[in-house]
Amino acid sequence: MGIKLESSELLLVPLTAEQLRLEREDPNAYAASLGYPDYTPEPPNSDLSDALLGMIGSASRAPHLWPWNTNWAIISKKRRVIIGGIAFHGPPQDGRVEIGYGIDLPYRHHGYLAQAVTLMCEWAFAHAEVSVIEAETDLENLVSQRVLQRKGYQPYRVEGNHIWWRLPRK
């Protein structure tokens, strides 16, 4: 399981099933499992907590699809802290994958999310079975929308309080 994605500022590490469990149940032990025992990440919100539970199940049912079914820790190399997470919502289906992400409040507005999205998109498009990466944002989440727009995503559907975005393979 030695996959890691890296930029000059970030390290993205896909979590094991045990690390997913720790992220959900014991954020301090989760941080320590990644080598950051002095850092306490924000506890997961209810949506993330539910998603982590689903990822734990997927990891055990389909270990060969693990990188698509897990959360990836976003780590600031300079600050030596976990600053958020990013994940696909499962393996490619009909050439499509959906990406989701979150950055802890103190680390927003520093360009980290854009770097993490770039790394994950490059990784996904390195797989021939991926032709489109999709994302969903709340209408009010202008920061996330700007990140997607800068990365080349185009909106393709608005429904209720959500916008769906699409980035095709170049």
Image: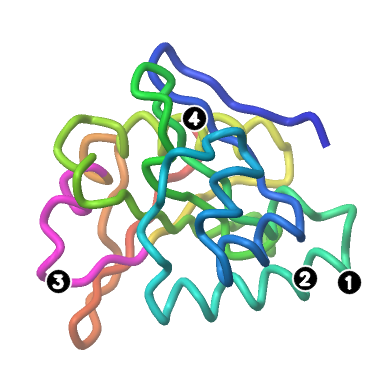
Apparent side of residue 119 relative to residue 117 in the rendered image (left or right): right
Give the crowd class for mark 3: few <14, some 14-19, many >=20 residues within 10 Å: some
Look at mark 1 in the image and give the residue it sits on.
61
Q: Identity of the amino acid at label 1?
A: Arg
- Mark identifier at residue 42: none
Q: Earlier in the sequence, mark 4 or mark 1?
A: 1
Residue 18: where, in percent of width, then height? 75, 59
Q: Position of residue 124 (x, y in %)?
A: 61, 39
Spatial distance from mark 2 to mark 4, Cα to Cα?
Answer: 23 Å
> Earlier along the polypeptide chain: callout 2 or callout 4?
2
Q: Disc 4 on helix, strand or loop?
A: helix
Q: Residue furthest top?
A: 8
Residue 128 falls within the magenta-colored stretch: no
Q: Are marks 1 and 2 in contact (CB under 8 Å)?
A: yes
The magenta-colored residue range is 136-147
Residue visible at 21% across and 51% down?
105
The reply to whether callout 3 and callout 4 are in contact (CB within 8 Å) is no
- C-alpha span from label 1 to label 2: 5 Å
Q: Residue, x 45% and y 38% (percent of image)?
A: 38
Quadrant of the rendered image containing residue 76: top left
What residue did someone put label 2 on?
58
Q: Horizontally, is 25 left or right of 141 in the view? A: right
Please state the horizontal and vertical placement of residue 139, each as a whole percent of the image. 14, 71
Residue carrying label 3: 139
**Helix, strand or loop at mark 3:** loop
Give the Cα separation between the discs numbered 4 and 1: 26 Å
Q: Which residue is mark 4?
A: 119
30 on left or right of 112: right
For the residue marked with disc 2, what is the amino acid? Ser
